Image (tube, helix red, strand yellow):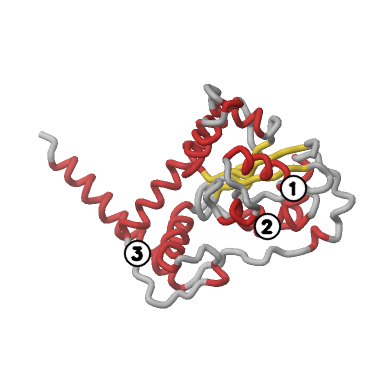
Amino acid sequence: MESVQSYLVCGVQNSGSSVLCDALKNTQIAGIPEEYFLIWEEGWWAQNHNLLSRQSYLDIVLEKGYTPNGVFGGKILWHYFKDMMEKVRALPSYKNMDDTSIMAQLFHNPKYIWIVRRDKVQQAIDWAIAAQTGVHNAQHRSLNDLEFDYTLIDNLHRLIEFGEQGWTNYFEHAHVTPLTIVYEDFVSNYNQSIKSILTYLDIDTTTSKEVLTKAPQTLTQSTSYQNDWRTRYWKIRELQTNQWVFSINGSRP
């Protein structure tokens, strides 16, 4: 299909990207932004389409990601972005190209939507809970037998900051300014946020008025576990910070 507009939703784990992508898919006019590049020709999606080569997988992704109005949508998280680039670069058409050139050619100069969460600690806690339950959808989680792990949460917090810095560097190098969506603002003003995104993408919204009234299926809500873990995390972090400051001051002559 000839591309009218293409865009990529960018983020890190537990940023709210799945809720955003589901919302965009629900409009039925904003492409089909799936996480196509997490697992390539080895994954279930490729196997269901009988795709054995990387090029054939790439070809069908670029076909299936469109809605009938010619809009393509995709989703990429930072933790596998570099691996994705290396796999594309292994194809003859993209050999020796840098990341920004690959993205421009592969997706026809896409627009970028960057979703972030204002509360990075809460994001890390949600990620830690997902890691323990094996479920990233908050609606389907069982919260039994969860264990607070400060080191895990702190490490995930650092990974979130590392990933967001990675996207910042990429956008600067590519000389592009993404549309930044703050998840907390998005879920509190859902319909207007979707309309603003469609306007940014230059998509005619006249055919999506009824669809835009649909609420997202799941939104992150704080639980007693999350609130308790948040309090415990900040207490431990403050204690460690105070100990570090004391050790530095104490070592001075």
Q: Residues within 10 Å of mark 2 (few under 14, many from 20)?
A: some
Residue that numbered label 2 is attached to: 22
Give the percent coordinates (x, y) of residue 69. 84, 45
Give the percent coordinates (x, y) of residue 185. 64, 53
For residue 31, the mark is: 1
Gap in angstroms between the C-alphas marked 1 and 2:
11 Å
Gap in angstroms between the C-alphas marked 2 and 3:
33 Å
Q: Residue at x 81, y 60 (%)?
A: 211
Residue that numbered label 3 is attached to: 232
Front position in the image: 220 or 87: 87
Asked if marks 2 and 3 touch (Cβ < 8 Å), the reply is: no
Query: Helix, strand or loop at disc 1?
Result: loop
Q: Residue at x 17, y 45 (%)?
A: 247
Asked if marks 1 and 3 touch (Cβ < 8 Å), the reply is: no
Q: Nearer the viewer, mark 2 or mark 3?
A: 2
Query: Helix, strand or loop at disc 3?
Result: helix
Q: Left or right? Give the position of 171 relative to 79.
A: right
Front position in the image: 192 or 248: 192
Q: Is residue 95 above or below residue 150?
A: above
Q: Is residue 62 above or below residue 129?
A: above
Q: Is residue 105 above or below residue 144?
A: above
Residue situated furthest right in the rendering: 206
* Pointer 2 or 3: first along the chain: 2
Q: Residue at x 42, y 62 (%)?
A: 131
Q: Nearer the viewer, mark 1 or mark 2?
A: 1
Q: Amino acid at mark 3?
A: Arg
Give the percent coordinates (x, y) of residue 151. 31, 56
